[in-house]
Image (cartoon, rainbow, N blue to C red):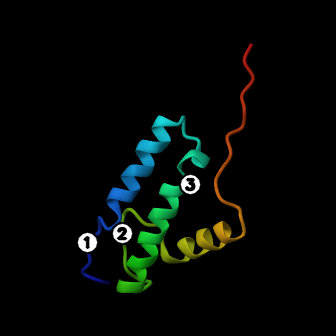
Amino acid sequence: MSSCDPNTCKPQACAIQDCLQANGYNESKCSKLIDQLYLCCKNFYEQNGSDAQSVCCPKFNLLQLKLKQRELGKIDAELIPTRRG
């Protein structure tokens, strides 16, 4: 395992949490921040290897899947409208 900082990409992860809270947890409002986190994590794994770990990054294989999904246009979760009354 690498001796890298386990908090790598923490500013990006925190920015996503702030954005989600401010936007009622609608991921589509935070797409750019999610992209920034994934880019940071991609760079992290490129520098430290696929076995490296960061509490702020998805595991390497999951990150690869997420990046592929984003390339295919399957970007963010959508909120299901709730009925009231």
Rendered location of residue 46, percent (x, y): 42, 85
- The total of numbered circles placed on residues is 3
Packing grade of label 1 (10 A; few <14, some 14-19, many >=20) is: few
Q: Is residue 7 found left or right of 82 in the rendered image?
A: left
Report the residue marked by disc 3.
31
Front position in the image: 36 or 14: 36
C-beta proximity under 8 Å, tags 1 and 2: yes
Q: Secondary structure at mark 2?
A: loop
Mark 1 / mark 2, whichever is N-terminal: 1
Indicate the amino acid at tag 2: Ser
Indicate the amino acid at tag 1: Asp
Q: Which mark is residue 76?
A: none
> Which quadrant, please, contains the C terminus?
top right
Packing grade of label 2 (10 A; few <14, some 14-19, many >=20) is: some
Q: Quadrant of residue 8?
A: bottom left
Rendered location of residue 18, percent (x, y): 41, 43
Front position in the image: 33 or 54: 33
Q: Quadrant of residue 47?
A: bottom left
Q: Is residue 46 found left or right of 27 in the rendered image?
A: left
Q: Secondary structure at mark 3?
A: helix
Report the residue marked by disc 2.
54
Residue under the point 57% across and 45% down: 29
The answer for how far apart the CA atoms under marks 2 and 3 are is 21 Å
Q: Is residue 26 above or below residue 69?
A: above
Indicate the amino acid at tag 3: Ser
The answer for how far apart the CA atoms under marks 1 and 2 are is 7 Å
Q: Is residue 1 found left or right of 63 in the rendered image?
A: left
Rendered location of residue 74, percent (x, y): 70, 61
Q: Secondary structure at mark 1?
A: loop
The answer for how far apart the CA atoms under marks 1 and 3 are is 25 Å
Mark 1 / mark 3, whichever is N-terminal: 1
Report the residue marked by disc 1.
5
